[in-house]
Amino acid sequence: MISPPSPSAGYVTDVAYLPGYYPFMAPARMRYVASLHGIRPPAVREGFDFLELGCGFGSTLLTLAAANPEGRFTGVDFMPVHTGHIEREIAASNLDNVRVLCADFAALPADLPQFDFITLHGVFSWVSPELRRCVLEIIRRHLKPDGIVEVTYNCMPGWSSLLPVRTLLRKFAGQFQGDSVIRVRQALAVVAEMRKADIPIFHDQPLAAQLVDRLVQADPHYVAHEYLNEHWTVFDAAEVLAMFHGIGLGHAGRLPYHHNHWALCAQPQFSGQFQGADLATVETLKDHHANVMFRWDLFSSRPREAWTPRERAEAAGDLFFRIASPQASLPHTVTYGGVTAGIAGPPHDRMLEVMGSSSWSLPMLLDAPHLAAFTPEALVEAVDAGVAMGLFRVDGGPVIDPIPPAKSLASAALAVPLAFNRRALEREDLANEQVGLASLRTGAGHEIGDLHAVILDELITDGHGGIEQRIAARLARTEKHLREHSTGRPITDPEERAKAVGAICGDFFATVLPELVRQGIVTLAAASAGH
Ligand SMILES: C[S@@+](CC[C@H](N)C(=O)[O-])C[C@H]1O[C@@H](n2cnc3c(N)ncnc32)[C@H](O)[C@@H]1O
């Protein structure tokens, strides 16, 4: 008897994926977006349950677990190479609020509980239609009534001119021997040759040509998992909205933040297209104006409520807002795709003065005597515009204020209290570009560059003495090259390299370390003269 093919067949499992921290999966970001749309976000203070379906190497799962000890985290993945790594990291970091299940979505344990957050990043577009139905059924059964789902997928119309790249890669990879990484490398070499010859498909579609250039530089494990899965699919947003509607969930917004505002996706003369349009049409239109190729969507079973600013402030009263950068000033201008927009004048000018370097909740802002001249509507609108345009950031809790002066940071003995973060720093071998550290204050991860991570590691293990020489020596022991910022040229001359290391250390003390201290990732001990 022939057994039917498994719904999970066709997914690339012969090579591992690659680790990566995804900030959009932090509960505070999802909760903010839901509240922006009048959807009451799940309460988290007394604890919450978080599920990641297809957690890969678990960088996001583990970072969020370390940053939210009150949360209970579960990761599911069917590749033992991924789940085995996560189990070892859980033990090494002493994390007791996270577990990982090595299981297929099509056969999850019956006793899986219900969750406040269910996330799936890099799954929905890459699995078979049957498995997608399994995933929707898992969500239907295991999302709490107040819960939020976050799902990512490839979408139209951004993929319309890129589809040939996927077709060619898969076609050629099928002709080579070896594992998926070997085959995708060879396939990429062929496609890169075609792109170099400027054949019409690439000449006529410059975005496809640029994609090939990026893929040649990318990690082949990523390229294999992104492009070689048999069931790889691109959706229109409206199709995905309909699928989630089918399990009783409505759209609860999206990330990045600016995608929630049509005026940051489409030029103002097209505003009429959005007036009175239904939600699916608005989402489709925004994607077409901005030529979006990848979506981060949130769904919830809760209705969208027409809140007063006070009700909104109460529903999201435990979210904190702060000025994103100490250099922030007005006018603040952003360009997203074809749209340039800005923030200037009141109430933002006054808010910048009043907010300083502190964290503010919406209730605090609405009650601030120095902002009493503005209506609650204007203040809430200003916060949302600031978040959408990167003037403000959203955290799950307040950061430390005031920041210790730069002089004391440059000499104080530093400590990294969380075992998870110490492990991330110890592990750093300058192979990855970014290192994700967990902040108990923001409830999220915070990424720093790999060289900055090495500087911090050196400072907490052996103090400040000779730090630049020690970093230069550590660099010399690795394959990592310092590169010139503008040209990418490797810096090999020892004198030039010493200067570059000096600049990186300077940047660390001036900008990176103050933020790490504010987020509580690094704490200061007494000053240690000359050490
Ligand atoms: C593209 S990776 C994304 C990993 C992680 N979410 C991230 O963003 O780094 C997709 C993950 O889904 C897992 N996966 C795919 N199909 C699955 C299935 N049927 N059951 C369980 N896990 C699956 C794969 O093993 C892989 O680790």
Image (cartoon, rainbow, N blue to C red):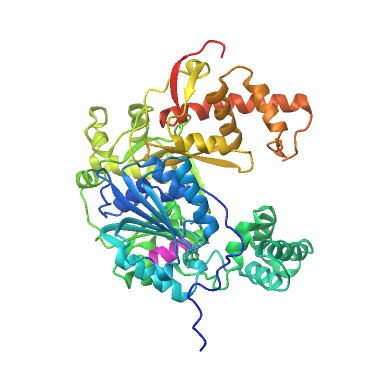
Task: Single out the residue that lies furthest toward the top.
Answer: 529
64 to 512, vertically: above or below: below
Q: Residue at x 60, y 57 (%)?
A: 222
Q: Position of residue 48 (x, y in %)?
A: 29, 49
Relative horizontal placement of residue 468, taking residue 88 as reference (left or right): right
From the image, which quarter does the C terminus lie in? top right
Looking at this view, is 158 or 419 the one in front?
A: 419
Indicate the quadrant where residue 377 lies.
Answer: top left
Relative horizontal placement of residue 352, taking residue 470 as reference (left or right): left
Q: Residue at x 55, y 25 (%)?
A: 461
| Main SS of residues in magenta | helix
Q: Residue 397, can we see it? A: yes
Relative horizontal placement of residue 491, taking residue 290 as reference (left or right): right
Looking at this view, is 324 or 248 the one in front?
A: 248
Is 491 contained in the magenta span?
no
Labels in figure, total:
0
350 to 434, vertically: above or below: above
Q: Position of residue 129 (x, y in %)?
A: 46, 75
Q: Residue 239, can we see it? A: no
317 to 398, vertically: above or below: below
Magenta stretch in the rendered image: 281-288
Q: Position of residue 502 (x, y in %)?
A: 65, 24
Q: Position of residue 245 (x, y in %)?
A: 32, 70
Is 284 contained in the magenta span?
yes
